[in-house]
Every structure is written in C-alpha cells, then in structure tokens.
Image (cartoon, grey):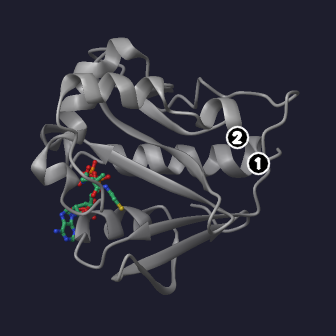
Amino acid sequence: MPKEPDNAMLSYRTGPETERLRHRAFTVDDAEAFFALNSHEEVMRFTGEARLASLEAAREAIRDYPDFDTVGYGRWACVLKETGAVIGFCGLKYLPDLEVVDVGYRFLPEYWGCGLATEACRASLAFGFETLGLRSIFAFVLPGNGASIRVLEKVGMRADGDLLFDGERVLRYVSTSSETS
Ligand SMILES: CC(C)(COP(=O)(O)OP(=O)(O)OC[C@H]1O[C@@H](n2cnc3c(N)ncnc32)[C@H](O)[C@@H]1OP(=O)(O)O)[C@@H](O)C(=O)NCCC(=O)NCCS
C-alpha cells in the first residue's frame, strides 16, 4: 500500500465493522456530530488540537480532509450500529513529518467507559496490518491522558519512549504486525 499519492491507489472510505461499530469516511452530513465531538472541551483536552469554533468550520474540515484521496486511508467516523449515530472517530493516519502511520481515536463523553475505543482501535490495527500490510503502527499520547494510555495497553501496544512535540512531552507507543492482541 503506497503512502504517497498514487493514481492507482485504493481508497478505503469504508473501514472495518466491529461488534458495535461501523467505520466510514465522514461526509458533510455528519457536520453536527463532527462539531459536537471536536468542539467539546473534555474531548479535546489532551489532543493538542484547537477546538472547532463553528458548524461551518466543521463542514470545511470534513470537505478539506485529504487523506482518503492522498494516502487511501484515514480517520473514519465511528457509527454506533444500534442507533446509527456518529459517536466518534478512529483510524489510521500517515504522518509525513515522522514517516510513520499512527492510530488515533476520539469519542463523545457519553460513550466513554464502554470499551468502544478499545474495540475500534483493535479493528484499526488489524486493518493496518492485514489489509494495508503495514509493519508497524504508532500512537502518540500526552502523559496525562490515562484513558487513552489504558486503551493502548489493552490493545497490546507497547511504550516506545517519548518525544518533544511543540515543546510538550509526548509518549510514543508502537505495535508491530506480529504483536497485536
Ligand atoms: C481516550 C478515549 C477515546 C477512551 O475511550 P473509551 O471508549 O472510554 O475507552 P475504553 O472504554 O475502550 O477504555 C478506557 C479505559 O481507560 C480507563 N480509564 C478511564 N479514565 C482513566 C484515567 N483517567 N486513567 C486511567 N485509566 C482510565 C477505563 O477504566 C478503561 O479501562 P478498563 O477497561 O481497564 O476499565 C476517550 O476518553 C476520549 O475520547 N477521550 C478524548 C479524546 C482523546 O483524548 N483521544 C486520544 C488522544 S491520544
């Protein structure tokens, strides 16, 4: 699976299905859910990203998201099968500066603590190794983000040192194709 733009590349706009979740690319029809997620103070606390300021900014972010066209995969909307609601995102992202692929996730607080991030993260790792043929997948997390660290531990990723990002210490986790649980 090439990481750089390639016209013959497959685009995985639909991702894996798990027991409780479907994964698919966001569309502008998801703008309200995307805004609720990415403007929420508690959700954004440990992400290092600015909160979205408006519904229009959410529409723009969805429209301008390039990854499915440029690398073929990206962060998917997580749709709760039971209700059809978009409740978060999860998926892989190629980080050109570091030349690695990372797994990331974010869910609305009312769905925290039910194992959904663990379920989604496991599915993204399996997709990366089995469908994309990746050798390793990384995750980057702030030391204070205990819930996210726990998710990474539960899916079998291992601590792999740290780095400074924008002057802030970030923990790195890694999983290699033979290690997933
Ligand atoms: C991180 C996040 C995705 C976890 O989602 P979730 O669906 O609640 O995760 P799960 O239920 O699968 O697992 C959470 C685990 O963390 C534990 N946990 C929760 N808060 C914790 C804390 N402050 N410290 C340590 N562990 C904690 C839970 O008990 C659970 O572990 P357990 O199953 O052993 O009991 C969610 O909190 C979130 O969306 N946070 C905001 C966005 C974010 O920070 N994303 C990650 C950026 S690196």
Q: Nearer the viewer, residue 55 or 18?
A: 55
In the orientation shown, which residue stands out farthest toward the right? 8
* 163 to 178, vertically: above or below: below
Coordinates of residue 124 in the picture (x, y in percent): 56, 45
Q: At 80% from the left edge and 50% from the top edge, which residue is drawn?
A: 133
Q: At 31% from the left edge and 73% from the top edge, which residue is drawn?
A: 142
Per the rendering, the mark at residue 3 is: 1
Q: Is residue 174 left or right of residue 141?
A: right
In the orientation shown, which residue stands out farthest toward the bottom? 161
Residue for badge 2: 71
Coordinates of residue 143 in the picture (x, y in percent): 29, 79
Dot 2 falls on a residue whose secondary structure is loop
Q: Is residue 162 left or right of residue 87?
A: right
Coordinates of residue 45 in the picture (x, y in percent): 18, 59
Q: Nearer the viewer, residue 163 or 19?
A: 163
Answer yes or no: do the residues labelled 2 and 1 have beta carbons within 8 Å? yes
